[in-house]
Amino acid sequence: MRTMSGVEPVAEAGADELANVMDRRRVVQALTGLFGALSLAPAFTPPTPVPEMGGLEHWLRHRGAAALGDTAVLGRYGEIYLAEHTHERNRGRLSLLLSGDGQGNVGIRLLEGIARDWREHNVVVVAGWVFARTEARICAVLHLMGGSTE
């Protein structure tokens, strides 16, 4: 039964459909948080040296993760990405792909990578979502940080 607006009432929507809508909402919130963390962090935090080993993970834990929103949702997309791109299932390799030589501000480098990917159409589809490859790789790092051993 549809209402006058043509929208099915929530109570009559299937549980799977409702779960999918909720999950998509959390992904949008998390990606918005990711963009916000990457774009605003340099403006409010002075650049500080980050340890050479694990600089990306250090940044995600101490600067980015608090602003990302639901990192568990992003980590699930990272898990799906890694299942389809097994050659990238390595924390060191991902860190190198995302952070390059480790010089400069990690947040700015990630934001530049996302912008470059969109500009060059370097995108991937993960569970029906179109991600800039850098975004998908950030999700993959979050997944690996969440307990996977590599």
Image (cartoon, helix red, strand yellow):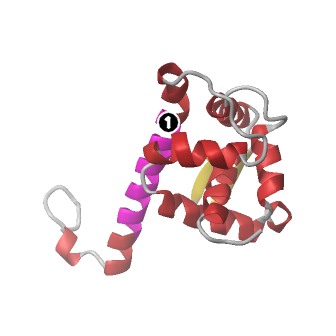
Going by the numbered disc 1, the residue's amino acid type is Ala
**Who is closer to the viewer here, 15 or 105?**
105
Reading the image, the residue beneath label 1 is 37
Q: Residue at x 14, y 63 (%)?
A: 3
Q: Can residue 103 be seen?
A: yes
Q: Residue at x 27, y 74 (%)?
A: 13
Where is residue 103? Give x, y as percent.
Answer: 78, 28
Q: Quadrant of residue 19?
A: bottom left
Where is residue 21? Give x, y as percent.
Answer: 37, 64
Left or right placement of residue 90 versus residue 13 in this view? right
Question: Is residue 27 found inside the magenta-colored segment of the image?
Answer: yes
Q: Residue at x 67, y 59 (%)?
A: 140
Give the overall secondary structure of the magenta segment: helix
**101 over 29 or under it: above or below:** above
Q: Residue at x 72, y 37 (%)?
A: 117
**44 over 117 or under it: above or below:** above
Q: Residue furthest bottom?
A: 15
Bounds of the magenta segment: 20-36
Left or right placement of residue 99 versus residue 16 in this view? right
Identify the element where label 1 is drawn: helix
